[in-house]
Image (tube, helix red, strand yellow):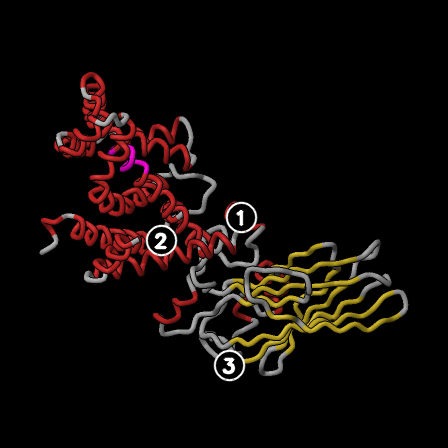
Amino acid sequence: MNSVRNLFRDLLHYPSAILGLVIIAILVAVGVYAVVTIPYAEAIRLWRGGEDVWYQNPKNAAPAWFNYFTTKDLPSTILITSRQEEETILSKIQAEKVYKPRENGQDITITYTFEYPYDEFPKDLIFYLYGKFDQKAPFAAIRWYTPDGREIRITDTAVQTRLTYRFLQDEKLKRRLKGVSPEIGLLADPNSDPPVPLKGTYKIVIEATTFEPNSDLDGEFVLHGQLHGWAGTDHLRRDLSLPLLWGIPVALAFGLLASLGTGTLTMIIAAIGVWFGGWVDELIQRITEVNLVLPFLPILIMLGTLYSRSIWVILGATILLNIFTGGIKSYRAIFLQIKESTYIEAARAYGASDSRIIFLYLVPRIIPLLIPGLVSGIPSFVFLEASLAVLGLGDPVLPTWGKIINDAQFNGALYEGYYYWILQPAVLLMITGLAFASLGFSLDRIFNPRLRGL
């Protein structure tokens, strides 16, 4: 306990260590939050669900914070719904719904009210209508009311169990708007040329008639903005906040397990070879020399291409291929010196077993040298997992930072100007590497006496 307390006290003397610890603590807290609030099964469902799950999101929308770097106020997505039980990813506005009973049915009036204070037009306007009936479908008339008092007829239609009405695909509406696309014609100031949005309060009114006592109608209005959420969306309407959040626990777990497994097994195998000597040591050294000339990344690429891209398979292969490396020879040189120590001779004299000497007398002596290497090695494995995903060899199920970059690259994000799609995961990768590198350098100074004065 005192050694841990002394370690933290020494770390406080290094600003880089404090910075690294703060960043790592934030990453761990956010990773735990992601796992708790979005369980694994739900995260996979959302990531692989595609447009059926994210239908309320716009395609390729930049993050909401993008407005801080533009001269114009770009529109964010607006969702208004009359469905009381509906759970959505977006913050939603509740529509006003009024029933007027009549014989063999009822009249329903649903009013959707929203403010539009933006300087640009939205990407799309969509109504999702849901009818509840036995034999006769409800009939709905949709009207649009602008801030300056104009009324525009949108459509009159029967509503089946589900009806998706896309404003931009209605040719009759375009003709009523004199050939102007609906996302412009419905929101433009009639006195402007070129058209600019008319700011103010808009209303959409659905006047529905049902023909059965228990019949009902509900609707969701979605205005797809140019911005969406704090992370934006991709080409499949998926909210990028999901893989950005879930990428944290995946990256940290992969990096920590790979670094810990590699460093610990390398140290133990080197200690076993030194202690037993003879053919055991020779075998370990020959395996190490063969492994040193094997191409590490091509082997992983071949494994992912021909066998499996599961993150657990990649993790296991990464650990196995990194055990017999130069670290074996470095640890061997240290263990050869420790083996000749007097306390080792004393342990052998009183009859200590081989396993006791290896795990209680040899290995603990170099743990202080192992810790900085473990911490410094984590970002290299984090970047390895991301690199494999960028090459298309990442786990196809998990939402990770590398998968975001791979999707962005495959869909021409840079050519289309969707820089946020690549920059956000790239920045998180750089921050993670900076945090562990800063902490690792500081730990190296603390545990290595030759560096303490630097």
Quadrant of the image for the C terminus?
bottom left
Q: Is residue 363 visible?
A: yes
Of helix, strand and loop, which mostly describes the magenta segment?
A: helix
Q: Disc 3 versus disc 2: distance between alpha carbons?
A: 44 Å
- Sort mark 2 into few (<14), some (14-19) or many (20+) by Cα contacts within 10 Å: many
Q: Residue at x 41, y 27 (%)?
A: 307
**Nearest-to-viewer mark from 1 and 3:** 1
Residue hosting label 2: 425
Residue hosting label 1: 50
Q: Which stretch did the figure color magenta? A: 261-267
Viewer-side residue, 150 vs 118 = 118
Residue hosting label 3: 191
Going from N to C along the chain, the mark reached first, 1 or 3, is 1
Which kind of residue does numbered mark 2 sit on?
Pro
Q: Disc 1 versus disc 3: distance between alpha carbons?
A: 41 Å
Q: Disc 2 versus disc 1: distance between alpha carbons?
A: 20 Å
